[in-house]
Amino acid sequence: MRRHAFRAVPALLIAAWFITGFYKVEPEELAVVKRFGRVVDRGVPSGLHYRLPWPIERHDKFQTTTVYKMGVGMITRDFLRGIPSPEELSLWLTGDTNILSVKVMIQYTVVDLASYLYRMQSPQFLMARIAEAALTDVLGGMTVDDAFTVNRPLIAREVRERTQARLDKLEVGIAVSSVNLLSIDPPNQVIDVFRDVSNAAADRERIMNEANGYANSVIPRARGEATWIEERAHADRNSRIAEATGEAARFLAVLEEYRRNPDASRKRIYLETLEVVLPRVKRYVIDRDGTEGFDLKIIDLDRRP
């Protein structure tokens, strides 16, 4: 009995050794299987799987659906905990030799697990150095004013594109999801001076906008008034021309009648003139009494009952 029991022990050990080849991959994970250190399966999906027991084969699992974060210009662990990082980590030089404090957060995922795990040691550290170099190149090509204003959205986009291009060239299996520019500020020692300059620039823009707004309101009104005056002048000219034309036509008609019958025309013109003039003139009558001397009776015909 003992002999049979001792003979079964090796078989049980071998069976237990083979059983250790079973492994489970969670839904958010991928696994890589290596045989004597060489990758034989680069992406084992979720579920229950089997590989040859150690030391022939081994597997490594990693969460590939998780979005990881890495900070540039700060200590990522401290930032996520709300602990400020040393300022010297975030200082960069611009193209016009000004110093800025810039903090960037990079989000990335693992798209090639085998390359990420075995291509090189510490790919996160490598990506951080690549992102720092990209940020240095981007800021070195612009002025401090551009970095604060018009080129602010450009910084994150350029850093992402340059970092991803370098990672693809090195084949480390990382895909940069996004690059967020958390802050871009002057150093603490000169921040008050920068704020004064920024406020002055803002005041300049405000005054220019107010001036442009005033000009935009005055110029159309002046143009409208000029158009109105011009149209009124045209209307007055046309009215005067029409009136003069009518007067000329009337005069020619009178002249034609005068040529036909001068006496009648003169008498008619005389009477028409009296009709116009007499109502505006005071009329007086001198009455003589028939004696050598005579008394003058002046009667105002306009006031008689």
Image (spheres, rainbow, N blue to C red):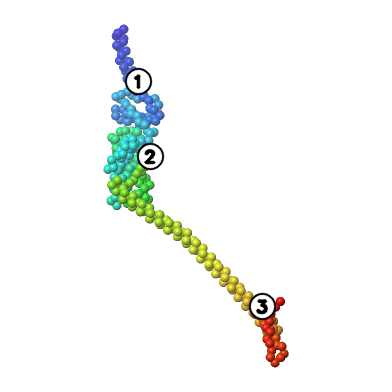
Sequence order check, earlier mark of 3 and 2 = 2
Q: Amino acid at mark 2?
A: Ser
Mark 3: which amino acid?
Pro
Q: CA distance from mark 3 to mark 2?
A: 101 Å
Per the image, the residue denoted by label 3 is 279
Q: Upstream in the sequence, badge 2 or badge 1? A: 1
Pointer 2: what residue?
177
Q: Disc 3 to disc 1, how far (Cα)? A: 137 Å
Query: Residue 228: x, y in percent?
Result: 53, 65
Q: Quadrant of residue 111?
A: top left
Q: Point out the image quarter for the N terminus.
A: top left
Task: Check if mark 2's residue and mark 1's residue have beta carbons within 8 Å.
Answer: no
Residue in view at x 36 percent, y 52 percent: 199
Q: Quadrant of the C terminus?
A: bottom right
Determine which quarter of the picture holds residue 252. bottom right
- In what element is the residue under mark 3? helix
In the picture shown, does residue 177 fall above or below 303? above
Residue beneath the point at 30% across and 24% down: 54
Q: Are marks 3 and 1 in contact (CB under 8 Å)?
A: no
Q: What percent of the width, then of the height, locates residue 121?
A: 28, 35
Can residue 160 be seen here?
no
Where is residue 296? Give x, y as percent.
68, 86
- Between disc 3 and disc 2, the foreground one is 3
Please report whichever mark, 3 or 1, sits nearer to the chain's N-terminal start: 1
Mark 3 surroundings: few (<14), some (14-19) or many (≥20) residues within 10 A? few
User: Dot 1: what SS?
Assistant: helix
In this orientation, does residue 86 appear? yes
Q: Is residue 289 left or right of residue 14?
A: right
Which residue in the protein does label 1 denote? 19
Residue plotted at (69% across, 89% down): 294
